[in-house]
Amino acid sequence: MKQASSGFGNLSRRSLVSTFAALPVLFGPLRSISASAQGTDPLPSWNDGATKQSITNFVTQVTTQGSPDFVPADERIATFDNDGTLWCEQPMYVQMAFILERVKALAPMHPEWKTKQPFQAVLDNDLRALAASGEKGLVELMAATHAGMTSEEFTKIVSDWLAAARDPRFKRPYTELVYQPMLEVLGFLRANGFRTFIVSGGGIEFMRPWAGRIYGIPPEQVMGSSIKTKFELRDGRPVLFRLPEINFIDDGPGKPVGINAHIGARPIAAFGNSDGDLQMLQWATLSGGRCFGLIVHHTDAEREYAYDRQSPIGKLDKALDAATANKWTVVDMKKDWKRIFPFA
Amino acid sequence: MKQASSGFGNLSRRSLVSTFAALPVLFGPLRSISASAQGTDPLPSWNDGATKQSITNFVTQVTTQGSPDFVPADERIATFDNDGTLWCEQPMYVQMAFILERVKALAPMHPEWKTKQPFQAVLDNDLRALAASGEKGLVELMAATHAGMTSEEFTKIVSDWLAAARDPRFKRPYTELVYQPMLEVLGFLRANGFRTFIVSGGGIEFMRPWAGRIYGIPPEQVMGSSIKTKFELRDGRPVLFRLPEINFIDDGPGKPVGINAHIGARPIAAFGNSDGDLQMLQWATLSGGRCFGLIVHHTDAEREYAYDRQSPIGKLDKALDAATANKWTVVDMKKDWKRIFPFA
């Protein structure tokens, strides 16, 4: 277990995910990823310029037979962070919203929570008390909301929640708060023989149920943090029971570890937005050969959010410096993206 | 860490793999898996009869549009154990042969091993002393041979070893001791839209380097036991360093856990040969829907080996009873297989 950080409001990305192992779910409106079907421009939601061109140049070079940078289709692997890279992570991780709302939904079955922290803080919307409960409190909330059921049951819980939940600012299902320009990148890469993987600090079973429908990414190409599960036969029927114990933290230096365990090959392209993605981008880009690294920089407070070096969620500091040093593409969301979300 | 078993000779499958986390490697002659190219019979090395027919019937039923048992291609997932199911596991696991030979190769750099157990036992070929060192000894041998290098370096070590190593009975590279009838099953399934995965108690990085060439299975479809790795930048170059610490034991009840973590979907067909595969077969076959379970029963001492309920390696006892109870196909190697190996 990680060391406790100073509190809920300051929970670092890493300490948050350490309590955030493996969820499953979702539900929401279909979004087509039809980049390759939109005429000649595979990236219509990107403004023309160096950023967009860096993407199309890379893809052209690695897919052109005879090019010195040609990469066989088998080796065209691209990895994507999820929170803040493919969908919105503000004002809090979606998985955190799930935890808080789930505690409220379960409260009638737990009358003792009315006077027991950290549950009382959640029920009273007392953010100060919640923060005071620290990582220990968050671990208890995780155990109460993410463990104690089968994987199948958890998938249904998350799916049902996502069908009903709405983002507080945009008043839409969270699955609509995905970045249209990034959906186009996913489609463009796949149309060019890439396999696209999610490598998220969030829970693997929180993402798998909807990643196929929303991103076109099947469960076996979704990696994330996880809790331990236990195989059992119940009345002769096999189930996996979710235990209140961290299994793997797929964040920071855990990302290349997870990528190697899962894929067994090095990506040639990696996409992230925070310091939690630094090592994944290093792994993909610092080993020689044609490769591509991209950082989404949230610069648009009007259409989405603006945050970087000081943000408690999605802190982008070391990775922003590394982007300059390593010539990774940095997306200026405000300048480079015509549209942010599919609906606007 | 698992409880120690009684000794080296008696090491159960589970306790052996608990010390056997993640290796990589190999090298050996190409073997084509050309089942679907051999005229009308996709399984030419199988004798006609109920066993062969159970395989072809299953594949026909799940791939026939309009059949009540039709399964969409996306969901056609088949999982295979490796040791004893796809290649020979007698007289000892190949990975164990690697450990013993690797200790001998490293001995000149470790003069202290001459008088230090369990290394002395290996160098003296003293199987009694080796057995006496128990699981603790095996863990030390693992640490000395599997950890302390990068994943890339380990891959090369295993590859070089496999290129030179020979099986003591057949005098051939271990990668030739794969079962021709099972290669045909792999090819037959893939020709019918299945994705084929290895789910082995053996080391994931011991298998990945050659599974593509020998079985047609890419690294991302190979699961196995693993040790922990650590991400590091060395002179600006990213590496994964192998640590002497177990990460995951992909055996017994660990197999469905690993399958869920890696694939995120339930297989509809599973192939194994020992009690270590029991839960994988239960996971694949006891949840309703058309499914297929198969156990390779080693009954041919003349052409390969004969062993089951009493064998310290590849013990087949509970899973043999479960096969009857659950109507899994049991391959009688002697009766059902025309050929065992590609070379004979």
Image (cartoon, coloured by chain):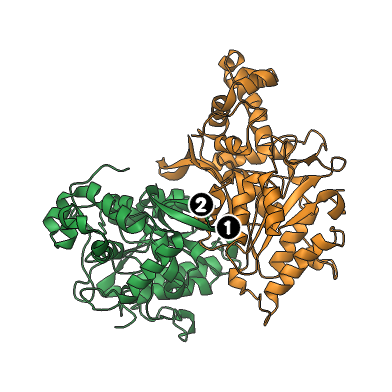
Chain colours: A orange, B green
Q: Residue at x 67, y 44 (%)?
A: A26
Q: Nearest the camera: A197 or A329?
A: A329
Amino acid type at image mark 1: Trp
Q: Which residue of the protein is positioned furthest toward the bottom in this rendering?
A: B39
Question: The residue marked by circle 1 belongs to what chain?
Answer: A
**Few, some or many residues within 10 Å of mark 1 (<14, 14–19, 20+):** many
B64 is higher (above) or lower (below) than A328? below
Q: Position of residue B157 (x, y in %)?
A: 37, 67
Residue at image x 32%, y 58%?
A: B145
**Where does residue A225 sit, x and y in percent of width and height?**
55, 44
Q: As displayed, is residue B326 above or below residue A94?
A: below
Q: Secondary structure at mark 1?
A: helix
Determine which quarter of the picture holds residue A290: bottom right
* Residue B218 relative to residue A313: left or right: left
Q: Amino acid at mark 2?
A: Phe
Front position in the image: A204 or A238: A204
Q: Which mark is residue B231?
A: 2
Q: Are marks 1 and 2 in contact (CB under 8 Å)?
A: yes
The residue furthest front is B235
Q: Chain of mark 2?
A: B
Residue A81 in sight from this viewpoint: yes
Q: Secondary structure at mark 2?
A: strand
- Residue with the mark numbered 1: A283
The picture places residue B103, in percent across and down from the top left corner, at 25, 61
Q: Position of residue B211 (x, y in %)?
A: 43, 69
